[in-house]
Amino acid sequence: MSEKIYDVPAEWAKRAWVDQAKYKEMYARSISDPNGFWAEQTKRIDWMHAPTKIENVSFAPGNVSIKWFEDGVLNVAHNCIDRHLAKRASQTAIIWEGDDPSQSKHITYQELHDEVCRMANILRTRNVKKGDRVTIYLPMIPEAAYAMLACARIGAIHSVVFAGFSPDSLAQRINDCQSKVIITADEGLRGGKKVPLKANVDAALAKADGVDWVVVVKRTGGKVDMNPTRDLWYHEAAAMVTTECPVEHMHAEDPLFILYTSGSTGQPKGVLHTTGGYLVFASMTHQYVFDYHDGDIYWCTADVGWVTGHSYILYGPLANGATTLMFEGVPNYPDNSRFWNVIDKHKVNIFYTAPTAIRALMQSGDEPVKKTSRASLRLLGSVGEPINPEAWEWYHRVVGDDRCPIVDTWWQTETGGILITPLPGATKLKPGSATQPFFGVVPEIVDADGKVLEGETTGNLCLTRSWPGQMRTVYGDHARFEQTYFSTYKGKYFTGDGCRRDADGYYWITGRVDDVINVSGHRMGTAEVESALVAHEKVSEAAVVGFPHDIKGQGIYAYVTLMAGVQPTEDLRKELVTWVRKEIGPIASPDQIQFAPGLPKTRSGKIMRRILRKIAEDEPGSLGDTSTLADPAVVDDLVKNRQNRK
Ligand code: WTA
């Protein structure tokens, strides 16, 4: 752990919304008078009916219920667009930077209004109503923003599915929330390569029922099959509708979106976020964590398929009337200077990315960074996984020229917005630490038995209080919501993360303590990869664990037991990797596959993953006690044939 401390630069303490004294004062108030504190924060957005009830929350076992601002009435699209028009009609809302560096465009708030209304009218004329689900399977093009905001405008619930997911994964998500409409594109474009999105939708819809319409955005002009009774071209439909579309009046607790995320068991969960609390929290965190001021150019490199894209490309920034940059491409195309060139091209002031990208770019040295100016940069951010101090230092020194604070923001799909983070004008930084809780957030570290650990300690991270951006339920399965988050430590929200608190009260997230792995900042349930593997006809059993990976943070290591009589060959190994890519998507590709005649199981049949993790980490000397295994001999073979020798 790095013990270096970076002070708040003097000019930051002066210009920032929040300095150290103000952080202390606001934090104390958020804890002692949450109703008063959050009532004030509701004023940052427009309401058709301002809420009088603030917090109504129970984390009690069997009765978990989370409501904020429940008698308020509002519309998210109105807040992100219409209310800004008087002042900002001609201000750029979205800067779109294409995969090809010669393609970019500026979309003003007025244009955003018009395009969102068109998309909303396309949906309304196809009978999409308040509460209906719409699946969005789009690349990083402005239409993704139009589609999400169009849903919000008419009260439909969007479910964005990352465009890297396979047809099967897409079908599963369409079925789970019973979407009536899919919005997709002919093809996506990333790093010069085409992704067959419409063809994927066609394949998914062979396995999903109830979809009436597929709206297809023309991105590449590639050839696609159109089903005349189901599919329509967006540009043709858009030409038939107007640029005015009245907003739906939504209750604060009406759903805004569903976003599927991996858990430690079984199928992905539909994380449900609602309207009022989510928007207040996204807007507030965006303003304070990134110290957003009028006129700043802000860039978050996430994909809208993940929660970071929802809260910090779209909803937070647009609620604040910001200029937000949306990037279609990848960090290493056409070369490793791409991020920095985009920063210079659009004069980006605030840059928010993931440790995996930083580590990958760090490998190509300082030169691709140093040949760019980056003079516009003022603040850097990190999200998605723990950032190792070496990567943090490089980001600070090389990318930020020792000038820009780094906000290492810890949060989750479930939390809706950032919960543990520095505020750049208030918090001294320690490389690798997410530092301090945001307003209203009360972290608690507990041991395996739930005993609360005080002071300097390490354990499991819980949150004892609700905040407005918290998820409300698992779509269609409230029992699973309670079981997953509130049953391990009764009366508390359990994050699934391990955490250390140091002597200064700083928080250091150490990574997942459940069967979720974090591959390049993408959450992956080991159970999902296992079920994809066992779906292959030659596989009898599979166990998947994570292992430390220099660039991805964690890699995927799969132990596979083959059906009797099947030969373990190199070709089969490749076939299984391809199979998992096809079943789930490229982000789930195993880095290592080890053929294992047997897996280490207890006498009751439970796989001892601890042992598998140690072998995958190439630490066969520290397997611990193996005497409780039904057949301790399987371990010898596993150790002998391990794939990850250093
Ligand atoms: C991890 C992404 C350390 C953590 C917003 C969490 C982090 C999971 C950080 C959520 C960080 C996210 N430091 N770990 N700054 N940010 N994580 O749902 O394990 O895709 O539980 O949300 O990512 O991933 P998710």
Image (cartoon, rainbow, N blue to C red):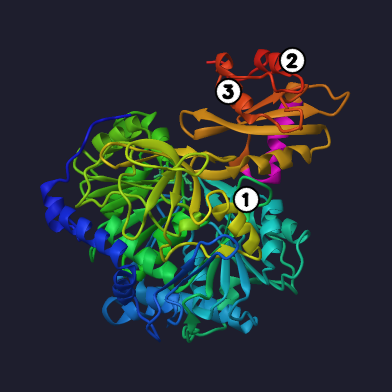
Q: Which mark is residue 231?
A: none
* Magenta stretch bounds: 572-585
The picture places residue 208, in percent across and down from the top left corner, at 75, 62
Callout 1 environment at 10 Å: few (<14), some (14 to 19), or many (20+)?
Answer: many
Query: Residue 89: horizontal and vertical position, in percent?
Result: 31, 77
Residue highlighted by disc 1? 165
**Precedes in sequence: disc 2 or disc 3:** 3
What predominant SS class does the magenta segment belong to? helix
- Label 3 sits on residue: 614
Helix, strand or loop status at disc 1: loop
Residue 606 horizontal/vertical position (percent): 72, 33
Q: Is mark 3 within 8 Å of ligand 1?
A: no
Determine the residue located farthest toward the right in the rendered image: 565
Q: Which residue is at a point 81% across and 33% down the rendered structure image?
A: 540
Is 578 inside the magenta-drawn segment? Answer: yes
The residue that label 2 is drawn on is 633
